[in-house]
């Protein structure tokens, strides 16, 4: 049996950090080294979240050097713009999986354009591997820093991958649950407002656009992207209207994803079929020559975040890619 891994989560008290913890404590090859939070040091995790009261684990504010030194892998569940210094401090001392957007883009100018702040460590951008296992599996295996994709971005990329390099234009509407906005309450995520509502936001300026266009091999002008907040907690359901070049030679999506255990190509897609699991469900329908409708769904906290991160960890350490994840059957109904 492979050596057990010591894993730590920096920023454990957010939704993504808690979802990571749920998966890591069930992983057969992982022991928890540190759970850290600056806001809640020296606190039993069960005092903060009663649903975890059965765990004998404490949240601490342990310094980054100690966490890195005593961990085989560190997951960073920190807000965008704040993970840069932490990655730099831990670089070379442990393997890092960053859940923020700080290392997803390999160009500092693009990062500054979409996140309105300079990137302090542009050289590290070149070292980070983009953590989409279905696209960069072999690179992830050798990586020291993995940048987990954005949830919208990963779903859109998996939807469009069969058409990459052959797209003339694409329109995507993606509806996300309230957990995608994070734990801190806001006007747009307050339940009485969101529970009976649909509202689009950041149309064609969403931060995940650079990730989508890079994989699809298109420009911003070829994409209309309409992110929309939905009246549910978990998941993203997206529809893409794809127009391809007249002479495009397109691979069969089912064949393309045959070797990827967490992508299911189906006749129809329903959000409820993915919730709680690491599956991404996709459906491809040809409307006419060169015109396609693609639908996709995933759980934004699992395949769109923590589950994908654990999948990346498995690849980085030579473990079975599905280890600790295949047991997460969708929660239904």
Image: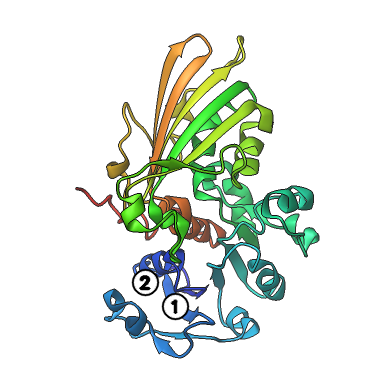
At label 2, counting other C-alpha atoms closer than 10 Å, the crowd grade (few under 14, some 14-19, many 20 or more) is some
Cβ–Cβ under 8 Å for marks 1 and 2: yes
Q: Position of residue 272 (x, y in %)?
A: 28, 44
Taking depth in this image into account, of 150 and 128 the one nearest to the observer is 150
Does residue 180 lie above or below 167 as drawn? below
Q: Position of residue 323 (x, y in %)?
A: 39, 58
Q: Quadrant of residue 14?
A: bottom left
Taking depth in this image into account, of 310 and 240 the one nearest to the observer is 240
| Residue name at image x 67 percent, y 33 percent | 220
Q: Position of residue 159 (x, y in %)?
A: 49, 33
Q: Quadrant of residue 147?
A: bottom right
Query: What element does badge 2 sit on?
Result: loop
Does residue 137 lie above or below 59 as drawn? above
- Asked if residue 233 can be seen in this view, the reply is no
Q: CA distance from mark 1 to mark 2?
A: 7 Å
Quickly name the residue at label 2.
25
Q: Position of residue 148 (x, y in %)?
A: 56, 55
Split into 4 quadrants, where in the image is the N terminus? bottom left
Quickly name the residue at label 1.
32
Way the structure is coloured: rainbow
């Amino acid at each position: 049996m492979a050596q057990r891994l010591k894993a730590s989560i920096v920023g454990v008290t957010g939704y993504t950090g808690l979802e990571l913890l749920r998966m890591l404590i069930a992983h057969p090859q992982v022991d928890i080294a540190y759970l850290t939070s600056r806001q809640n040091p020296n606190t039993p995790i069960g005092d903060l979240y009663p649903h975890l009261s059965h765990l004998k684990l404490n949240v601490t504010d342990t310094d980054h050097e100690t966490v890195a030194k005593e961990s085989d892998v560190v997951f960073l569940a920190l807000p965008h713009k704040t993970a840069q210094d932490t990655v730099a401090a831990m670089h070379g001392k442990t393997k890092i999986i960053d859940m923020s957007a700080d290392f997803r883009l390999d160009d500092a100018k693009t990062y500054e354009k979409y996140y309105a702040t300079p990137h302090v460590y542009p050289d590290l951008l070149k070292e980070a591997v983009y953590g989409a296992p279905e696209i960069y599996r072999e690179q992830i295996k050798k990586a020291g820093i993995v940048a987990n994709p954005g949830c919208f971005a990963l779903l859109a990329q998996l939807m469009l991958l069969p058409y990459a390099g052959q797209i003339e234009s694409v329109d995507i509407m993606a509806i996300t649950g309230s957990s995608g906005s994070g734990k801190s309450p806001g006007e747009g995520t307050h339940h009485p407002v969101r529970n009976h509502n649909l509202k689009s936001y950041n149309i064609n300026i969403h931060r995940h656009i650079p990730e989508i266009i890079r994989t699809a091999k298109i420009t911003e002008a070829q994409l209309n992207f309409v992110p929309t907040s939905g009246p549910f907690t978990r998941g993203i359901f997206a529809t893409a209207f794809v127009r391809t070049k007249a002479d495009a030679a397109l691979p069969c999506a089912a064949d393309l994803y045959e070797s990827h255990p967490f992508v299911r190509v189906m006749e129809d897609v329903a959000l409820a079929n993915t919730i709680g699991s690491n599956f991404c469900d996709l459906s491809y329908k040809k409307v006419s020559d060169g015109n396609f409708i693609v639908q996709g769904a995933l759980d934004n906290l699992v395949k769109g975040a923590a589950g994908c991160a654990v999948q990346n960890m498995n690849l980085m350490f030579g473990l079975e890619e599905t280890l600790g994840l295949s047991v997460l059957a969708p929660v239904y109904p």
